[in-house]
Amino acid sequence: MTEPNYIVKICLLGEANVGKTSLVYRFIENKFKDNYKSTLGVNLLKKDLNLEGYGEIVAQLWDLGGQESFKSLRKLYLEGANGALLIFDVTQSKSFEKLRDWIQDFKLAREDEPILLIGNKNDLKGKAQISDKEAIEFAKEFNIEFISTSAKIGTNVEEAFNKMIKTILDKIMKA
């Protein structure tokens, strides 16, 4: 890859076991494993892309550990983030209930940078505890968009990451 036109830093936020790591690996390698270990602290990954109208992009993906024990490190990890994917597991209402805390932490560190809400594991429809309607209502409250994904089967994963990257780049280009 030649010198990139843009380098963007995106943080993946959400409780432990919502599928952040699975989403990143589905996006980067188009693979899914059932047995990822919990992320301890942060996992840094990157993907080089060429997006029409934007050119060569390097997406730095910061997969933050969702455990409460890493909360004190969040501000440090969020430093310089251009945007965040805020992820909950549609089969775990607790992961949805904690979203406000994640938004608050992100906004304290990054103020007006964009956030995209992701309801992951939509392949488990029969086990869903949070409906798309509930997620859309929540997203409206914070003036953010919502996308339903499945890292396991790949539904909307690329779309979610590309949407966030384009939102960030559009904001950079307007500045």
Image: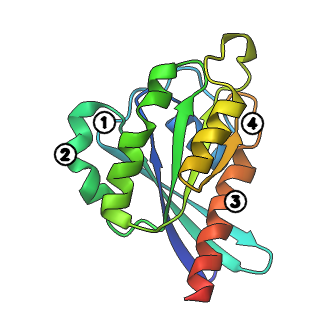
* First reached walking from the N terminus: tag 4 or tag 1: 1
Q: Earlier in the sequence, mark 3 or mark 2?
A: 2
Relative horizontal placement of residue 109, taking residue 130 as reference (left or right): left
Q: Secondary structure at mark 3?
A: helix
SS at mark 1 in the image:
loop
Q: Nearer the viewer, residue 109 or 61?
A: 109
Which residue position holds label 4?
A: 154
Name the mark on residue 40.
Answer: 1
Judged from this view, the residue extending furthest toward the top is 126
Q: Are marks 1 and 2 in contact (CB under 8 Å)?
A: no
**Label 3 Cα crowd, 10 Å radius (few <14 / some 14-19 / many 20+):** some
Instruction: Characterize the local packing of mark 4: few (<14), some (14-19) or many (20 or more) Cα atoms within 10 angstroms.
Output: some
Mark 3 and mark 4 lie on one chain; the one further toward the N terminus is 4
Q: Residue lying farthest right?
A: 52
* Picture disc at residue 72: 2
**Is residue 106 left or right of 175 when viewed as pictured?**
left
Would residue 97 be seen by someone viewing this image from the given angle? yes
Q: Where residue 118 appears, x then y in whole percent?
A: 61, 41
Q: Hey, what amino acid is under mark 3?
A: Asn
For the point 71% across and 37% down, the residue is 148
* Residue 58, placed above or below residue 158: below
